[in-house]
Amino acid sequence: MEDLWEECLTTSLVNACEPTKPNVLSDWKGLLIFGEQRQGRIHPIVFELLGWAREIASKMNEPVTCALLGDNLKEGAKELVEHGADKVCLYDGKIFSHFREDPYAQVLASLAREVKPNIFLLGATATGRSLAPRIAARLGTGLTAECTRLEVELESRLLIQTRPAYGGNMMATIVCSKHRPQMATVMYRAMKEADRIPDHKGEITKKDVRVEELLDRTRIISSRKRSDEQISITDTDVIVSGGRGLADPKGFELLQQLADLLGGVVGSSRVPVDEGWISSDHQVGLSGRTVRPRIYIACGISGAVQHLIGMRTSDRIIAINKDPEAPIFGIADVGVVGDLYEIIPELIKRIKERTLSLIGMRAVEED
């Protein structure tokens, strides 16, 4: 089975390459993380990868290295050290100010050959999805995309990579036993973010690059931020999501009322998006966003595995559904069986009453 997975998951280039020799596998040590940044700000997923890497590195007694590419990013490099990076390789220059696959892939592949990491991780963002396969092809190694869970078998030092397969109907466990580095992209919000370690000692090394030797087949003429900024369901503490059980697009108006009261946003399963009831930037799940809010309220969502993949790491899950056998109740911390059109209005009423009561108590205390 392992050989079958290896065959299925590696590119034609990898299959054409000789596997890394067994006596050389031990030369590949530590973890390398791509420090993705956007407009000079480190992407939050990097801190999630650092949190996981820091935990694994402490068990394996191996270093964590971050690769940071951009322009004027000295402060960003310090931030990575403060979150647990033992070494930051900083490629600082105008050529890296805007992401382009060619120079980024060339530099990162070269760094991987130099550092020889056992594990190389990137975020499963638009940038990571574009960059990772190009690096893997250059290194002649395998790549597992969009992982939702990672573990390391300490004795063998194998990376156990878990990701959805067959449209999310099953979870595949994958290893890359014959090539190094072991590469994976990881879904945003699939891991806990690293805590800041103010006294952590790390090394920042500025790497020199001969610009004239870099392949660069694209040119950025101009860039601008979208004027119709999409909602961000990945960075909120409360999400109130609706599914097929709403039965009517107007049901989202009710969910919006609840979300507004709780200071959250509205999410959705795939069916309402496909039906045109709500825009795709609200979608949670395999073909949408992975979220990790403090509170996730699932209204009329049965709990198909494709949806669960995107929200099961939420701190608290509250499910409201007519069907007592709905799979969503299997992962919910609180389950309410009943008609959401009766339950949610009552919940809104109670929250408003509670809010008014608290306001009254505070007024009395101030007097």
Image: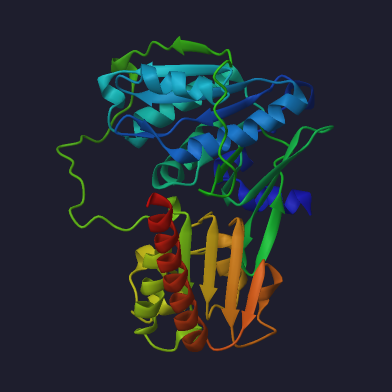
Q: Quadrant of residue 311?
A: bottom right
Rendered residue at 51%/56% (across/down): 290
Rendered residue at 43%/52% (across/down): 365
**Residue 241 is at least partly visible in this image:** yes
Q: Nearer the viewer, residue 312 or 162?
A: 312
Question: In the drawing, does residue 294 fall left or right of residue 271?
Answer: right
Question: In the drawing, does residue 218 fall left or right of residue 231?
Answer: left
Residue 362, relative to residue 206: is it above or below? below
Where residue 99 sits in the image (x, y, percent)?
32, 34
Where residue 117 sits in the image (x, y, percent)?
63, 25
Where residue 347 sits in the image (x, y, percent)?
49, 77
Rendered residue at 45%/82% (across/down): 345
Residue 4, relative to residue 127: is it above or below? below
Q: Quadrant of residue 94?
A: top left
Question: In the drawing, does residue 95 fall left or right of residue 273?
Answer: left
Q: Nearer the viewer, residue 249 or 366?
A: 366
Where residue 74 sits in the image (x, y, percent)?
37, 16
Q: Quadrant of residue 268?
A: bottom left
Rendered residue at 45%/62% (across/down): 358
Residue 357, relative to residue 59: is it above or below? below
| Quadrant position of the N terminus in the picture | bottom right
Residue 359, relative to residue 131: is it above or below? below
Residue at the extreme left of the image, as rendered: 221
Q: Nearer the viewer, residue 136 or 287?
A: 287
Q: Disc count in the image?
A: 0
**Residue 269 is at least partly visible in this image:** no
